[in-house]
Image (tube, rainbow, N blue to C red):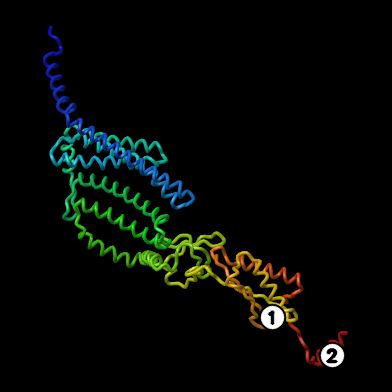
């Protein structure tokens, strides 16, 4: 009985396997691709290390700056994704060169796909609170990445691409396949992630490096965000081969709908850009709109946040700030004059009362010495001489009622100590004549 294994056949299979590995796995092209992959990984690690050290120094320098600290924390967290993404970008250069000269580049393709998978895993699962679903998503991403990388490594990727190209869609006169949608999806993710980090870095630069006013910073930040978003959409649509003119009719209908249904919303958006551009109202200003008085905490594209002295935050639509009457206490300067009205008795020493009130203003903390406080007589009332103390402050954002209260308290104490009377309204009734009937009735009752 013969052996179940044909030794000659097994030897032939072994020889073929050895020849395959000698031709591909142990070839100079394989060694060159491994060296290129290692160099790309090393260079990406060095670049991300430089970025991480620079961001760490900036974070230590601006530790007390709340907005800069938040931006730097996000950028530092994104460095974990940058190194894998940078390695992928570096690999695209030798990959395109090898593809142009028709050199073997299967290993470069597989390594690039695995780096994309690593980038997506770090991007999507890093901040997920539910770790179970994070693991499920990571396994799905790695499964697809390894599947595509394996197909590319053994020269079967063209079959997969032909399968995806066979599933096509039609939008009007434009045809695009599932392969284009797949690539456009990853392109959109990459552009979104890059634009997001560029937007955060741009905000950090505007906040601490530009030296611009807060209104100009917000305006440039909003415009930059819109431009980045529009650029991402246009690039993806152009990659899909969609002619942007097909959206002309849709844009006209959308504009008509916005004109009627979303008129108020877009009025507030336009008003927000106008306010940021003309700098009439900017974050930090102290404004008064009807009965609302407070400091502007945030000026967005749709509404303005005003925080009052009672810690109540009002969200005022930007259109109201454009069309309504607004008092800006700190528009061109922070100097504000306050008036404190005081009534003094007619028999009091007015010159002494004036000196006492000026002394009170000198002792009040927030009252400025220059411009000088003043005490004037504004009129003669029914029961008192009307006097007015006028003082200046340069910090209206801290409130004005507290300054008036301090002045009133000081005047009250000084007047009591020096015998200055502040009268209350009195009326003297003089009876010139009394009818006889009333007198007679009074006498009979007695």
Quickly name the residue at label 2.
440
Residue 318 x, y percent position in the rendering: 42, 66
Image-based side of 199 in relation to 338, left or right: left
Picture residue at 87% right of the left edge, 87% below the top: 444
Residue 309 x, y percent position in the rendering: 56, 62
Q: Residue furthest toward the right?
A: 446
Residue 103 x, y percent position in the rendering: 14, 36
In front here: 146 or 405? 405
Q: Which mark is residue 385?
A: 1
Q: Secondary structure at mark 2?
A: helix
Which quadrant is home to the C terminus?
bottom right
Picture residue at 35% right of the left edge, 53% below the top: 199
In front here: 428 or 187? 187
Real-space Cα separation, disc 1 to disc 2, in angstroms: 44 Å
Image quadrant in which you'd find residue 214: bottom left
Which quadrant is home to the N terminus?
top left
Q: Neighbour class for label 1 at 10 Å: few (<14), some, many (≥20)?
A: many
Picture residue at 20% right of the left edge, 30% below the top: 31
Q: Which mark is residue 45?
A: none
Image quadrant in which you'd find residue 420: bottom right
Q: Are marks 1 and 2 in contact (CB under 8 Å)?
A: no
Q: Tag 2 or tag 1, which sits nearer the N-term?
A: 1
Q: Secondary structure at mark 1?
A: strand
Q: Residue furthest toward the front?
A: 370
Front of the two marks 1 and 2: 1
């Amino acid at each position: 009985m013969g052996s179940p294994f044909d030794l000659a056949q097994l030897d032939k299979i072994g020889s073929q396997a050895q020849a395959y590995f000698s031709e591909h796995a142990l070839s100079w092209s394989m060694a060159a691709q491994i060296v290129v992959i290692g160099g790309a990984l090393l260079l990406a690690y060095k670049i991300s290390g430089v970025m991480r050290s620079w961001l760490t120094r900036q974070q230590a320098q601006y530790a007390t700056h709340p907005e800069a600290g938040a931006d730097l924390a996000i950028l530092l967290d994104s460095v974990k994704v940058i190194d894998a993404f940078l390695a992928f970008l570096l690999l695209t250069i030798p990959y395109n060169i090898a593809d142009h000269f028709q050199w073997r580049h299967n290993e470069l393709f597989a390594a690039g796909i695995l780096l994309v998978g690593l980038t997506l895993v770090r991007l999507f699962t890093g901040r997920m609170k539910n770790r179970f679903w994070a693991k499920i998503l990571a396994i799905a991403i790695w499964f697809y990445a390894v599947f595509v990388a394996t197909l590319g490594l053994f020269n079967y990727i063209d079959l997969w691409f032909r399968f995806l190209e066979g599933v096509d869609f039609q939008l009007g006169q434009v045809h695009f396949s599932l392969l284009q949608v797949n690539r456009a999806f990853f392109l959109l993710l990459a552009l979104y992630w890059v634009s997001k980090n560029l937007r955060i870095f741009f905000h950090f630069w505007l906040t601490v490096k530009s030296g611009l006013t807060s209104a100009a910073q917000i305006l440039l930040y909003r415009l930059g965000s819109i431009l980045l978003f529009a650029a991402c959409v246009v690039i993806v649509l152009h990659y899909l081969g969609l002619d942007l003119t097909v959206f002309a009719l849709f844009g006209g209908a959308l504009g008509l709908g916005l004109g009627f249904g979303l008129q108020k919303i877009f009025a507030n958006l336009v008003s927000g850009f106008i306010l940021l551009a003309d700098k009439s109202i900017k974050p930090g200003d102290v404004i008064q709109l009807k009965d609302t008085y407070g400091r502007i905490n945030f000026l967005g594209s749709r509404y303005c946040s005003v925080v009052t002295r009672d810690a109540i935050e009002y969200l005022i639509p930007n259109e109201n700030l454009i069309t309504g009457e607004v008092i800006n206490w700190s528009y061109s300067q922070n100097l504000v004059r306050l008036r404190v009205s005081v009534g003094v008795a007619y028999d009091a020493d007015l010159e002494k009362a004036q000196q006492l009130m000026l002394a009170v203003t000198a002792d009040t903390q927030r009252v400025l010495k220059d411009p000088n406080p003043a005490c004037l007589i504004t009129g003669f009332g029914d029961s008192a001489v009307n006097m007015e103390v006028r003082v200046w402050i340069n910090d209206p954002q801290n409130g004005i009622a507290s300054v008036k209260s301090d002045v009133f308290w000081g005047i009250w104490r000084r007047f009591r100590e020096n015998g200055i009377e502040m009268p209350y309204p009195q009326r003297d009734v003089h009876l010139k004549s009394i009818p006889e009937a009333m007198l007679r009735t009074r006498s009979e009752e007695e």
